[in-house]
Image (spheres, rainbow, N blue to C red):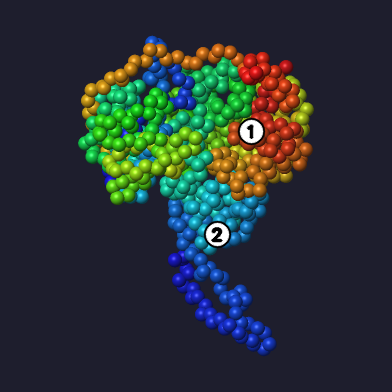
Amino acid sequence: MAVGLDKVQPDKITEDKHLVVQGMDISGHWNRMFEQRVIWDYDVDNLEKVTNLPGGESLGWCYGCAKCTAVCPIDIVGDYSPRKIHRKTQIGVDLFTSSDLWLCTTCMNCLRVCPKEVNMIQIMPAVREQAVLTGAVPPELQKAFEDTAKHGNPLGQPQRKRADWAKAAGVPVPIIKDLKRPVDILWYVGSYPSYHPRGMDAARAAARIFNALGIDFGILGIEEKDDGDSQRLAGEKGLFEMLAEQNIATFGKYEFNRMVVTGPHEFNAFKNEYPKYGADFKVAHYTRFLVEHLDRLKPMLKKPINLKVTFHDPCYLGRHNGEYDAPRELLRAIPGIELVEMGRCRENGYCCGGGGGGMWLDSFTKEHTTMRLSERRVREAAEYGAEVLAVCCPFEVSRFEDAAKSTGNDKLMVRDILELLDESMKE
Amino acid sequence: MNIVVPIKQIPNLTDELEINGEGTNLDHDALQYVLNEFDEHAIEEAVLAKEAAGGTVTVIGVDTTGELDGALHAALAKGADKAAKITGDFPRGTDSHTQAKLLADAIKGLSPDLVLTGVQAADDRDGQIGPMIATHLGLPYVGVVTGVAVKDGKAMVHKEYAGGLMGEFEVSLPMVVGVQAAHQPPRYAPVSKVRQIAKTAKIDEIAGGEAAGAGSAVRRMFKPQSAGHAEMWEGGPEEVAEKIAALIKEKGLLKG
């Protein structure tokens, strides 16, 4: 029984089939609006099932203001928000078996505005973990979990080929195991930059930029495993912990001053989660790292890129970790670029749909939304007249390129900031 | 009901397959090994049968890789009750005749009512382990099965044929089944559950006997040689259709 409800007595109602008082018909069913809300008709235990879970408590704090509904990216293309989930669990929907469980991308726009700090970033993984333990996982996501566990990456590619991308970089990409000495920067490349064709383009661009700047770096190559942060948020905490143990042990074998990462999701994992498992190293996202070198990088950006560019703030770099400026500083350093801001920018950035497991739930999500989040975002970029949609998260490139094609915005180019810098460094 | 699931590990097919120096087999040590996919279906079908009719599921395999424990733990996480492995000098790539004999000897002691194993494995595509185990144990065998239902000591077994045909067999237990696919997709074993089981589970070790001998020897194993190339034709549908028609005539493929 929900707290406090035992102190409230149900109304004692009598419903006369035919009752006319002073000429007014007050018989029958219509006057139910004058009694207490029909919460008694529903089983409120489903809300408690969530709030009793460690990590799920904050769902109970919702008081229905709907500030979250206004900013939730899924609600713009569907019917969703923490407030709606709170209400639905109050009136009998079981979140553990509901489709609502798998739509949240943990973008954090709700938590940003919530006066009661209802925290979906904790609620969703906690409930999803229980669902996964009972085996209730959408099949596409299950495959991503299994591939990550078996091959160290969610794309199902062989571990042995994780460093093959470097062969076509055109510059040396040292494997830290072969260097046999301490390095300044351990560059954690990531799964999508290592295996996805468009991710590999960005990785090669990064290698060329680091070489041009004379950075003393090394990569882990085939010893590198996925950070697992999105899998954690999708309910596979055990998988995340297994990867963290393996990665932390691998990092511990080498001496380096700092780690630089290509993607915001691993930035989030290494900065905020890995210390809980004993990791102790400094980490920077490549945008902040390159801004530190901007005085030497800027003179190398010789070739103008005369295009209108808009920047998409990645949820896990921006809202989750407070970095909005470094990417923009890099873009502004490229000659010729006209930087335009979309309406939903910076703290109010609109999620691409890839986080929280969304990268591996497209077959599921598209059944519950009028359009994909990435399609909504690409339309916004086009509305602002952008010729290039600039990104700095490896999940985004493929999502936005697919969305550009499926929304008829084929002319919109999607480029990682690394690719734009690399292009500007060419003769 | 006592259900036994023999399993085996095979080279991971997403890896690049290397031939050994003698050119007679894969370079097994260079490869990563994974559970045979058809055996995953066998495990699932066994757990489903147990959930429907009661009993225990024992998963057993010859430990040719030294890494069979992981597969056994995952099976326990999916609902199997017991795990056993056959140990001895049986390296990676141990032939199916030997594996079948070792498994049959071990399984005999378990007195199974139902033996479910993958109908084939992608390494040798022999499809022989199931029938050979059945022969050693003197039990009936039905392969390419997509559903098993047990009632009153009999199994109703659903078998697939080519051309979309299906067959249903009523077979007295005990029997051996070669599973093509479980009647539901294999369930997910959460990593935390597998790790937990890895800490506490007890795997029975059975010492294996002698190798049986494969009965055949591989003379040569080699990667396919490309004999030519594909010619790509450009043009609209009418243009290309004319080219195809001309080629068919030129190659003398039309009668008369």
- In this rendered view, identify the residue nearer to me: B107 or A369: B107
* Residue type pointed to by label 2: Lys
Q: Quadrant of the C terminus of chain A?
A: top right
Q: Is residue B59 visible?
A: no
In the rendered view, tell whether residue A190 sits above or below residue A363.
Answer: above
Q: Residue furthest top?
A: B22
Residue under the point 60% across and 19% down: A169
Q: Say which residue label 2 marks.
A: A88
Q: Quick one: SS at disc 2?
A: helix
| Pointer 2 chain | A
Q: Quadrant of residue B98?
A: top left
- In this rendered view, identify the residue nearer to me: A330 or B94: B94
| Pointer 1 chain | A
Q: Quick one: SS at disc 1?
A: helix
Q: Is residue A421 visible?
A: yes
Q: Quadrant of residue A248?
A: top left
- In this rendered view, identify the residue nearer to me: B127 or B98: B127
**Residue A175 in picture, x, y percent from top left:** 50, 19
Residue A279 horizontal side relative to residue A330, left or right: left
Residue under the point 47% across and 68% down: A4
Q: CA distance from mark 1 to mark 2?
A: 35 Å
Q: Earlier in the sequence, mark 1 or mark 2?
A: 2
Q: Say which residue label 1 marks.
A: A397
Asked if the residue at tag 2 contacts the one at tag 1, i.e. Cβ–Cβ closer than 8 Å, the answer is no
Residue A219 horizontal side relative to residue A374, left or right: left
**Residue A137 in picture, x, y percent from top left:** 48, 45
